[in-house]
Amino acid sequence: MVAISEISRTISMSKIVTRFSDWIDDFVGSFRRGGNNMPSPFIPLYDGNFYICSFDLPSVIIGENQHEFKIIRAITDGAGGNGVLFLAQKWATNYFDRKELAIKVSKRQDGVRIDRFRNEARIMSQLDHENIATYYDNGSIPVENERGEFNIPWIAMELGGCNLRRHVESNGKLPLDLLIKVGVQMCDALSYFHRKDFIHRDIKPENFVWVKNSNEKIKMIDFGIAKKWGEDLSGRLFDNLTKVNEFVGSVFFLSPELIAYSRDDTKKYPVDYRSDIFQLGKVFWYLATTKISSGVPSKKDCPALWELVMNMIPDNPEDRIQSTEEVKKFLLSL
């Protein structure tokens, strides 16, 4: 029998751990998939509101940048919404270099939503900030059946925790000290975003999530309808999302200029970074009070934050605080 000391001289501990981990992954994966190399759960595909078919997500997908991701399990069940979220692992030879992350897979096959997915990947790939979800890779999965050929887009990104809308619904308003910490991080994320000449256009509580295993640090997400300031979107399908019917759920956080834009009337006010400031003011008020203000908020609901919010949400962008850096200074003075 070979002595343990001889084995330790020929095989490094990292290789032992890696091989053991691979064996566990294979065993658990085989058990979960019924003892064979079956793919992960199916995803329903739609064109608009019309069901096309269902397809099985492969257990391993490879992105445009040649990163390999192993699908672990579904985080969302695919009911409703435009996509399905999966827990995945970025593959690395060394077990300790492997990283858990999220894979967002589109289930909508109409051109507008596919373009939105591609737009999000395009923008995320240009971002690097501690308060913005990290981008890892993106790609598409070819699917063919009797109805035709489809390419299902996906994005690999940092895995976050609960979004702030759900947190408030479950736990109530944020205490002022926590709200200030969270608000400062939101300002930092948007200041960086605006310095890169991007406009988010969809600032709402759902688009900020807790960092995994944290109740103080947040990340900004969802860049599907974001754009470069001054960018001509006349030929881009994804911009139809802001002009047709895709403001459901975020309508109460819209700036006046975004509402005008959705009606194809951009003559009164341009949509620029100050639209994000307006939406951020609405988000602050919701986090502080659990209320979504449709007009002038009541000072008695949160006297400490009222003056700041009132300076963020005037209808005319010229009358607002003009930068998220100024918003941050105001927060830190509270």
Image: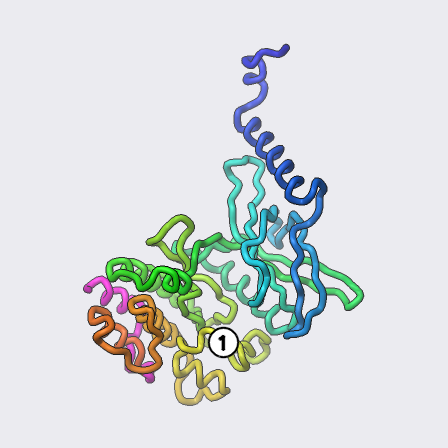
Give the amino acid type for the residue marked by disc 1 in the picture.
Answer: Val
Q: Magenta stretch mostly in which secondary structure?
A: helix
- Residue under the point 56% across and 46% down: 90
**In the image, 195: left or right of 320?**
right
Q: Work out whether 202 lies above or below 41.
A: below
Dot 1: few (<14), some (14–19), or many (≥20) neighbours within 10 Å?
few
**Vertically, is 93 above or below 160?**
above
Which residue is the site of mark 1?
Answer: 248
Q: Is residue 328 magenta?
A: yes
Boundaries of the magenta span = 315-334
Colouring mode (rainbow / by chain / secondary structure / one colour): rainbow
Q: Position of residue 192 (x, y in %)?
A: 38, 62
Horizontal and vertical percent for residue 329? 24, 65
Q: Is residue 181 magenta?
A: no
Q: Nearer the viewer, residue 287 or 61?
A: 287
Q: What residue is drawn where x is 40% and y is 65%?
A: 165
- In percent of width and height, residue 325 lies at 29, 66
